[in-house]
Amino acid sequence: MSVVTSMDPPTEPQTWHYGVVARWWAEFNTSGPEIAYFQTYVEAGQPALDLACGTGNHAIPLARRGYEVAGLDLSRPMLAHARRKARAARLSIPFVHGDMRRFDLGRPFDAAICAFGAFGYLLTDADVLRCLRSVHRHLTSDGLFTFEFWQRSGMHPPPYQSWFHRSGREYELVRLSESRPSRRPERLSIEFRFFVFKGSRVLDRFNEIHTVRTYAIDEMRALLRRGGFDFLHGFEATRKEKRFRPVRKESFRVMAVARPRAQS
C-alpha cells in the first residue's frame, strides 16, 4: 500500500501516479469525452503538444485520428505505460520525460493541451509563469493553448466527497475522494483512497493526499498575460463532458483557450 501523508505543499512538482498507481491508471483512466473537445483545437493546428500527458489517454486517441502529437510528463512510470500502449496501437508518438514548468523540445507546435486539472498542481505564481513561458516558447505565433483549471467560486462546501468506479478486463477500481480548503484559501487539499478488486477480493489499496490550486477568472487572465498570452475563451466543463458553454460563477472545472500575445 502506498500512502502520502504530508499536508504541506511540496517544493517540487507533484506527480502522483508512480509505480502501482500508474499501472492501475493506465488501464482504467481511458480516453473520455474531452477528446472531441481537444480535437477541435488540434485539427486547427498540428503538431500538438500534450502537457502532463500521463499514460497517453489523449495523445493516443488523437494520433489514431491521424493527428501529429507529442507528450510530456514528469512521471516515468506513466510514460512507460504510454509508450507501451502506443506500440500496441502501432503508433509513433514521442513521449518525453520532462517538467512542464521548464522544458525545451527543440521544435515548434501549433497547439498545446493540458487536461485533467494538471495545471492546478502548479501552486505558485512563479511556477505558473515558468510553465506559461515554456509553452509560449514552443507555440507558433497563431498557435493555441487549451487547458483545464479549477475555479474557486465553484468549489463545493467542505468536506466535499465524491467517488468513481471503473471496470477493466480483469479488475475493478474504486476511488473515493474528499476535498477541503487548505491553509491558503486558493489551495484545495484532496484525499484519495483507491481500492482495486478482482471479484469480491481486494487486491490492492492505497491513499494519497494532493494539494492543488484554484483560480478566479480574472486571476487566470492576469497570469496568462504575464506569461505572454491573451485569454480568448473559457468554457464550462464537467467530468462527463467538455462543451462550449459559458462559464458561470458555479462552474468548477473550466476549459481555457489562450493564444500567444502579439508582440508590439
Image: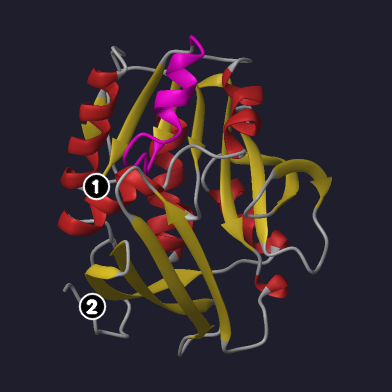
Part of the protein shown in magenta: 51-66
Q: Is residue 34 above or below residue 264?
A: below
User: Given the image, on which type of amino acid does mark 1 rest?
Assistant: Leu
Q: Secondary structure at mark 2?
A: loop
Distance in Å between CA atoms under marks 2 and 1: 18 Å
Whole-percent x and y of residue 228?
A: 55, 40
User: Given the image, on which type of amino acid does mark 2 rest?
Assistant: Val
Q: Secondary structure at mark 1?
A: loop
Give the quadrant of residue 42.
Answer: top right
Q: Is residue 151 above or below residue 166?
A: below
Left or right of residue 93: residue 178:
right
Whole-percent x and y of residue 144?
A: 59, 28
Q: Is residue 154 above or below residue 34?
A: below
Give the residue at mark 2.
Answer: 4
Give the quadrant of residue 14.
Answer: bottom left
Is residue 109 something one can see in this rendering?
no
Q: In the picture, which quadrant includes the N terminus?
A: bottom left
Left or right of residue 152: residue 119:
left
Front residue (pair 198, 45): 198
Whole-percent x and y of residue 28?
A: 38, 48
Residue in view at x 52 percent, y 70 percent: 163
Mark 1 Cα within 10 Å, few/some/many (few <14, many 20+)? many
- Disc 2 or 1, which lies upstream in sequence? 2
Residue in view at x 49 percent, y 31 percent: 112
Whole-percent x and y of residue 23?
A: 23, 49
Residue in view at x 25 percent, y 84 percent: 6
Q: Is residue 58 magenta?
A: yes
Give the residue at mark 1.
Answer: 74
